[in-house]
Amino acid sequence: MKGSVILFSEDHEMKILEGVEKPIYDKIKQQEAAQHCFITLDDREIDLGYVSPVYWREGQIDME
């Protein structure tokens, strides 16, 4: 199942990751409020930094 992950940085900046598998979201959620949130996307390790809160939405987010 793929969906969108909505996350907020320490300075309240919002980021949206679309097309994310649910297990990746679960890894992000486990690291919520840690100094660094590490995930692997497309065979690359990415540091999202501090993220809290983190939300999941099945499917894509309509921005219109």
Image: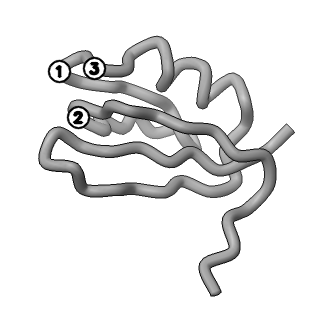
Find residue 35 and name its label. Answer: 1
Q: Is residue 10 left or right of residue 19?
A: left
Q: Is residue 7 above or below residue 36?
A: below
Please name which of the two marks, 1 or 3, marks the residue nearer to the observer: 3
Disc 2/disc 3 C-alpha distance (Å): 9 Å
**Residue identifier under label 3:** 33
Out of 56 and 48, give the one closest to the viewer: 56
Disc 1/disc 3 C-alpha distance (Å): 7 Å
Give the amino acid type for the residue marked by disc 3 in the picture.
Ala
Q: Residue at x 38, y 33 (%)?
A: 53
- Give residue 55's quadrant in the image: top right
Q: Is residue 54 left or right of residue 14?
A: right
Cβ atoms at labels 1 and 3 below 8 Å apart: no
Give the amino acid type for the residue marked by disc 2 in the picture.
Gly
* Label 1 secondary element: loop
**Residue identifier under label 2:** 49
* Label 2 secondary element: loop
* Residue at the right extreme, as displayed: 1
Mark 2, Cα crowd under 10 Å, few <14 / some 14-19 / many 20+, is: some
Cβ atoms at labels 1 and 2 below 8 Å apart: yes
Residue 58 x %, y %: 78, 46
Q: Residue at x 63, y 57 (%)?
A: 18
Out of 18 and 40, give the one closest to the viewer: 18
- Give residue 1's quadrant in the image: top right
